[in-house]
Image (cartoon, rainbow, N blue to C red):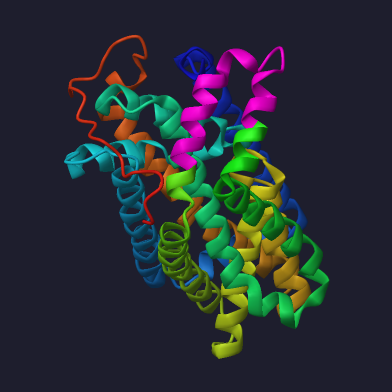
């Protein structure tokens, strides 16, 4: 079971792997860009822009929370207090830096304990978040991929996987056949019931209307971070302009795609390499400016979010007493009919 695999100790060890890996990547960036020059670039940055950048990151989180809440209602979680929902959502931020983001499955356990929804349905919500975010950043990358076709293979591969998940979930005979096939496998068969619950949740969440709404909302939220990246480049002395804005949005979005595809903790390493490399190859920045921009945007996005989540952890120690129930009684209501067009 997920709850048994994600013990407090195993979660901390996975988180430490991500933190250590992030620190190593930081050192590598400093080394590649020349530590002295990178430090000078960061010191010369127009720090008055950083609150705006972090405000755009917060906007991203707020819009993604709206999507999270939308998904919870689709699987039948009604009248769940927004404050508690937001606590679980933000507590999931540090889990993004666990290997393969496996720690994010813990959000499904928290939902189960607070609302009574099955863990499998909660995992379906986590998957839907990731898929809709992936489709959103791919949408933001489209024009850039057209302009720079060398990035097309990676774009197409990720798009195929994401659309495959959505399409297969909506072809019930195929999905049920796959579930039955999996149920006959020796190691998977005992989880057949959970897989069935996971599929029913996925079927609701990946219907066309919810998928379009969630992906559209995600496109707006991730566009905010792309604009924040543009402001960081401006703060480092890069000449402003519409082309630079378009490049900033494309580079950040595409780095998220590569980071997610890598399954590395938080995309650490893959995303940084993509940002720094594309700033050099596409925009023509020198190595030190590219490294400084990469460090600043990751601090203002990934590590800013992880810090918020860790603050929630500090005030919510009961989240990690996985053997104890949380204070809220089950509030699950009947989900929408799976045959109804949502």
331 vs 220: above or below = above
**Does the image show residue 127?**
yes
Of 284 and 132, nearer the camera is 132
Q: Nearer the viewer, residue 195 or 245?
A: 195
20 versus 279 height, above or below: above
| 6 inside magenta stretch | no
> Residue 210's image quarter?
bottom left
Residue depicted at 44% across the width and 67% down the height:
216
Q: Position of residue 302 (x, y in %)?
A: 50, 50
Q: Is residue 190 magenta?
A: yes
Along the horizontal axis of the image, is 248 left or right of 222? right
Q: Return the x and y of residue 197 as percentages of the image width and height.
A: 46, 29
- Please report the residue visible at 58 percent of the width from the left and 70 percent of the height from the top: 139
> Does residue 293 appear in the picture of this structure?
no
Q: Quadrant of residue 102?
A: top right
Give the residues drawn in magenta, as a range.
179-202
Depth check: 126 or 200 in front? Answer: 200
Q: How many marks?
A: 0
Q: In the figure, residue 107 lies in which quadrant?
A: top left
Q: Is residue 115 left or right of residue 14?
A: left
């Amino acid at each position: 079971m997920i709850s048994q695999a994600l013990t407090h100790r195993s979660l901390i060890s996975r988180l430490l792997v991500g933190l250590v890996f992030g620190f190593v990547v930081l050192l590598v960036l400093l080394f590649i860009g020349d530590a002295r020059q990178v430090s000078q670039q960061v010191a010369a940055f127009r720090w008055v822009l950083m609150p705006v950048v972090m405000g755009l990151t917060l906007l991203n989180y707020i819009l993604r929370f709206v999507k999270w809440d939308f998904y919870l209602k689709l699987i039948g979680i009604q009248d769940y207090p927004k404050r508690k929902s937001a606590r679980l959502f933000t507590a999931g931020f540090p889990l993004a830096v666990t290997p393969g983001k496996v720690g994010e499955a813990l959000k499904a356990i928290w939902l189960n304990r607070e609302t009574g929804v099955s863990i499998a349905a909660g995992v379906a919500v986590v998957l839907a978040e990731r898929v809709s975010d992936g489709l959103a950043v791919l949408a933001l990358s489209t024009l850039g991929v057209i302009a720079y076709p060398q990035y097309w293979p990676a774009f197409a591969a990720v798009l195929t996987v994401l659309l495959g998940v959505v399409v297969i979930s909506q072809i019930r005979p195929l999905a049920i056949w796959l579930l039955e096939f999996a149920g006959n496998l020796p190691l998977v068969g005992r989880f057949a019931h959970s897989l069935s619950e996971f599929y029913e949740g996925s079927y609701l969440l990946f219907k066309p209307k919810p998928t379009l709404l969630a992906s559209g909302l995600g496109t707006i939220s991730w566009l905010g971070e792309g604009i924040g990246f543009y402001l960081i480049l401006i703060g480092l002395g890069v000449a402003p302009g519409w082309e630079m804005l378009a490049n900033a949005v494309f580079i950040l979005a595409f780095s998220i795609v590569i980071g997610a595809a890598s399954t590395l903790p938080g995309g650490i390493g893959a995303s940084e390499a993509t940002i720094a490399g594309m700033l050099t190859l596409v925009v023509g920045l020198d190595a030190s400016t590219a490294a400084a921009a990469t460090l600043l945007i990751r601090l203002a996005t990934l590590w800013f979010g992880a810090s918020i989540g860790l603050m929630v952890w500090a005030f919510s120690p009961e989240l990690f007493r996985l053997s104890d129930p949380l204070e809220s009684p089950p509030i699950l209501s009947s989900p929408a009919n799976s045959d109804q067009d949502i």
